[in-house]
Each structure stands twice: as structure tokens, then as C-alpha cells.
Amino acid sequence: MPANVTPEYKKAEERYLQARTLEERIKATEEMIRVAPKHKGSEKLLRTLKHRLAKLRLELEEKREKKVCRGSGPSFSVKKEGAAQVALVGLPNSGKSKILQELTSARVEVADYPFTTRYPVPGMMQFEDVQIQLVEVPAIVEGSSYGRGLGARPLSVARNADAIALVVDASDDPVKQIRILLGELDAVGVKLNCRPPKVTIEKRSSGGIEIKGAKLVEGGEIEIKRILQEHRIHNAFVVVEEPITPDEFEEALSESNVYPKGFILLNKFDAPGADEKLEKIKQEFGGMLEVLHTGEKLEDLKRRIYQQLDMIRVYTKKPDEKPAERPLVLPRGSTVLDVARSVHKDFAKELKFAKVWGSTKFPGQQVTKDYVLEDKDIVELHI
Ligand SMILES: Nc1nc2c(ncn2[C@@H]2O[C@H](COP(=O)(O)OP(=O)(O)O)[C@@H](O)[C@H]2O)c(=O)[nH]1
Ligand SMILES: [Mg+2]
């Protein structure tokens, strides 16, 4: 906390600490932003406050959304179906509806004016024998997280998805569009292709604050205690296992971040200069996000989307019978035991070994429970 804040600011902060409801916390945070010093040294403070405000507003909208009864008009929540849900997120007119239309059987209006799609629209994409749900999210603009455009509700749809496709327009400035989208997603705690920091915070009813690995947080124990205090936590056992910033610590504490998979989908690939823009995007973001584009054949694009989800298909079979027609779809890295679990929990308990066709050296090779499977493996479970 900068030492040179005004009494007004301290008052607003006090109000924030005392706030009981979400609405009160939002009001107090808005006030803190309004009265915070506006010079170079307070940029970080302002950024933290704006982040907090965006998340609080989102929380409020999610709460309101839950209160809306069924049958009261179109809804912002989309029931997950299929093996995974992929949110199509983009600026107005980036071509989200068009992509949804081409990849799924969903009927949706494609039009050259902004905000045509005002509610999320789901569609099912069939790739080979897997069904993947695509959801067109109403357009995001710079400032959506602070209430601009259609507000933060579209972002709350994105928060809920298993993966996010950043749909950008090759006839425009896609690099700028990606920056805006990443900024808005970040503001509401969506971290693409990341994993949560290795921090655990176990709240207790007494015993004060005990910290392991305090030095790994910038500012050490004092900073951790300050943050805990701000969250009105007075008793807790904290374990930090890797170097993190105070911001990251606070995020771990409020569990406000989500960690979906993410990739870029460059649309309007027929636009002049699209190839060069693709290269530029790869240079800027290639280390962090894969770049797909609509110049690919439809089936190839579907395959690429499926690959982004990092899942595998496994076909179970019984001895002397044919493999199941429909696959089980599991996260990459899943083992024989995971397959048994998803078939039946009793199965998992009694599992002895399995025979696998596909990734093994020999067809029908016997493997142990911890054998890691690959896409399209056939598995015969033995109990
Ligand atoms: N040239 C070209 N135009 C496209 C493409 N995809 C969409 N559009 C046009 O871009 C406009 C916006 O498309 P739409 O799918 O409604 O965008 P949304 O607002 O992101 O859902 C429409 O006029 C579309 O015809 C494309 O691949 N190439
Ligand atoms: Mg649309």
C-alpha cells in the first residue's frame, strides 16, 4: 500500500473492509478508484483495484443470473453437452456466428452489424466420432469487463467453458484484437493455458496465521498477512510452493481465476494479406497460443480444434467382442485406471490389468493399471 494515499482514500478502504454485501464492496472499490492518487507510483494500485472491481461486478452478475427463473427469456448460461465446451470469443463482426454455422448445425444470424448475437448460442460440432459443443459468446469489446458493450456477462460465459477460441478478423488488425480479448479475459480472471499457482490456504477456526514458504511471495510474511487481513482471514495455514507475486497470492486466495485451454482462430482468411497477418500473430503469441485459421479445410479445422482440447478417445471392449462404437473421451494423460473409473467405480476397485490395442508395442498387450493411454486406443479391462 503506498504511504501517500489521502485520508479520503483511507476512508474508502475502510468502507471496503467493513462491507458486508457484494454491492457494498463494489461501491467502496469504485470510490477507492475515484479517490486513489493518479500518478506514476500508483499505477499498480489502480490496476489491482480495477481488477478487483471487474471481478466483483462479474460475481454480482453471476449471482443475478442464477436468480433469474427459468422461462423468463433467453439465458446466459449454457448447459454443457458433448465431450467439451469451447467458447467462441471475439469482437463484434469477427465472424463468430459464421464459424458456428459452418462447424455445427446451429442456426444463427450472420450479419454485418455489431452485437447481432445478444445471447450465447450453442451448437454441436461433430468431429469423427466425438461431439464437441461450440458456444458463440456475444461480442466482447475493450472495456466489457467494466460494463461496456453488453457488459461482463459474455465474459462470464467464457469463464465457464473448457476451452476458449479467440476469434479474430484477418481483414482488420487481429493482433490488436487478440490483445483486447486477452486483456478482458484477464480482467475477469480467465488465464489461458496456465495452471493455478502452487499455493494452498487452509482456513482454520483458531491458531493465528501459520505460513510455510513465506519468502517465495514478494514482500514475504508481512505482505501475506496484510492480504489475509484484507480478506478478514485471521486463522489459516498457508503453504507456498513456488515464487509468486502478491497479486497471484490474492488470486489464489479468492479462487477467482479459471484456467481453460485457449487458442487463436484467425477468421476471414480470404481477406487480402491474411497470410502475413497469420505470421505476425504466430510471432507475437505463438509461444503461448496455437494459431488456427479458416483457410484450412473444414475437416482439418475440426481436427485442429479437437487437438487443442488435449483429449483422447478410448474404446472399451469385452473379451472376444468388438470394441464399443462410441469412445470415452478423457483428458490426455489418462490411464487404464481412469478408464475403469469412468466405466464404473466398482470396476476401478477390482481392476487387475488391461489389454491394449493401439499405442502398445504389440496388439492386445497386457498393461498395468497406471498405463497411460493414447488417442484411439482400444482397452479390454480385466477384473
Ligand atoms: N470475407 C469474409 N467475411 C466473413 C467471414 N466470416 C464472416 N464474414 C462476414 O463478417 C460479418 C460478421 O459475421 P458474423 O459471423 O455475424 O460475426 P459475429 O458478430 O462475430 O458473429 C458478416 O457480414 C459476415 O458475412 C469470412 O470468413 N470471410
Ligand atoms: Mg454473432
Image (cartoon, grey):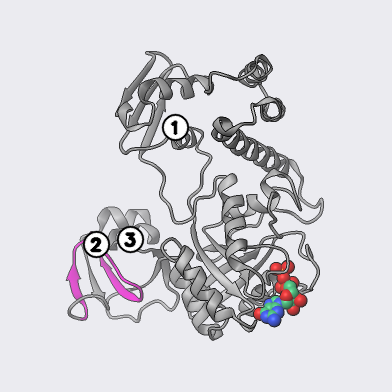
Residue 69 in picture, x, y percent from top left = 77, 45
Residue 263 in picture, x, y percent from top left = 50, 65
Rounded to the nearest angstrom, the CA distance separating label 2 from label 1 is 49 Å
On screen, 151 above or below 249? below
**Mark 2 or mark 1, whichever is nearer to me:** 1
Of 290 and 41, the residue lying toward us: 41
The answer to if 364 sits in the magenta stretch is: yes
Rounded to the nearest angstrom, the CA distance separating label 3 from label 1 is 41 Å
- Residue 383 numbered mark, or none: 2
Rounded to the nearest angstrom, the CA distance separating label 3 from label 2 is 10 Å
Residue 88 seen in render: no
Q: Mark 2 or mark 3, which is nearer the start of the sequence?
A: 3
- Residue 340 numbered mark, or none: 3
Q: Any atom of ligand 2 within 8 Å of the CB at mark 3?
A: no
Query: According to the image, label 1 marks what residue?
Result: 246
On screen, 19 above or below 346? above
Residue 70 in picture, x, y percent from top left = 76, 50
Secondary structure under tag 2 reads loop
| Residue at x-position 68% and y-position 38% | 57
Which stretch appears magenta?
363-383
Q: Mark 1 or mark 2, which is nearer the start of the sequence?
A: 1
**Three-letter code for the amino acid on which mark 3 is drawn:** Ala
Of 35 and 209, the residue lying toward us: 35
**Three-letter code for the amino acid on which mark 1 is drawn:** Pro
| Residue at x-position 64% and y-position 75% | 99
The answer to if 377 sits in the magenta stretch is: yes
